[in-house]
Amino acid sequence: MQISSRFTIAVHILICIEIFKNDYKVTSDFLASSVNVNPVVIRRLLQQLKKAGIINVKRGSGGTDIEKPLDEITILNIYNAVECVEKGELFHFHEKPNSSCPVGKNIHAVLDIRLEEIQNAMEKEMRSISLQDIINDAKKIINL
């Protein structure tokens, strides 16, 4: 199991928007050059972040701004905006385990609660980290 790169790309995008907001017009092409992906990928993620109320996108080459205070945006907000994971469904279960097998017949009873606990723990930790925390880390590393 692996979370898609949409999440890390979205965080990368948000860091760039904040770091470069005063020096550059932060467009999808600009962001794509930093992430090193096709601008179409960036535009899709920007739309998802906009729909979640995290950013504001100006049409054309107007650029992008973060809509809310950085300390009010958690990495869970970002994750929920760009990942297609519903509560309790971080782990995708294999389809149709063999009901004739004692393990296959009971695998959900064995794992469902544990997997939900793992997802809840991950989400709790993600809820405790703000975009401001991430930006602060980035500024230290980049020496800004």
Image (spheres, grey):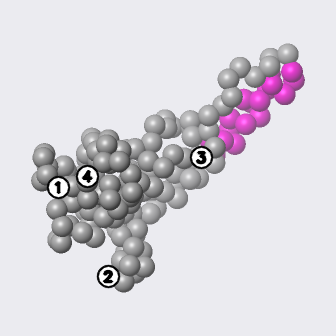
Question: Crowdedness of circle 1 by 10 Å Cα count: few (<14), some, many (20+)?
Answer: some
* Kind of residue at badge 1: Gly
Q: In which quarter of the image is the C terminus?
A: bottom left
First in residue order: circle 4 vs circle 3: 3
* Residue bearing the label numbered 4: 28
- Residue occupying image coordinates x 24% and y 69%: 20
Mark 2 or mark 4, which is nearer the start of the sequence? Answer: 4
Q: Which sits earlier in the primary sequence, circle 2 or circle 3?
A: 3
Image-based side of 72 in relation to 114, left or right: left
- State the residue position of label 1: 63
Mark 3: which secondary structure? loop
Q: How far apart are marks 2 and 1 (CA)?
A: 22 Å
Q: Where is residue 87 in the image (x, y as percent from the top left)?
A: 51, 37
Residue 84 in sight from this viewpoint: yes
Secondary structure under the numbered disc 2 in the rendered image: loop
Position of 138 relative to 98 (above/below): below
Chain-order first, disc 1 or disc 4: 4
Q: Do the residues labelled 4 and 3 touch (CB within 8 Å)?
A: no
Q: Mark 2 points at which residue?
A: 144
Magenta-drawn stretch contains 68: no
| Front residue of this view, candidates 128 and 132 | 132
Per the model, the C-alpha gap separating discs 1 and 4 is 8 Å
Spatial separation of the CA atoms under disc 2 and disc 3: 32 Å
* The quarter of the displayed image where residue 63 is located: bottom left
What residue is rendered at 30% in x and 48% in y? 39
Q: Which of labels 4 and 3 is toward the front? A: 4
The secondary structure that dominates the magenta segment is: helix
Closer-to-camera residue (137/6): 6
Residue at numbered disc 3: 2
Stretch of the chain drawn in magenta? 101-117
The amino acid type found where label 2 is placed reads: Leu
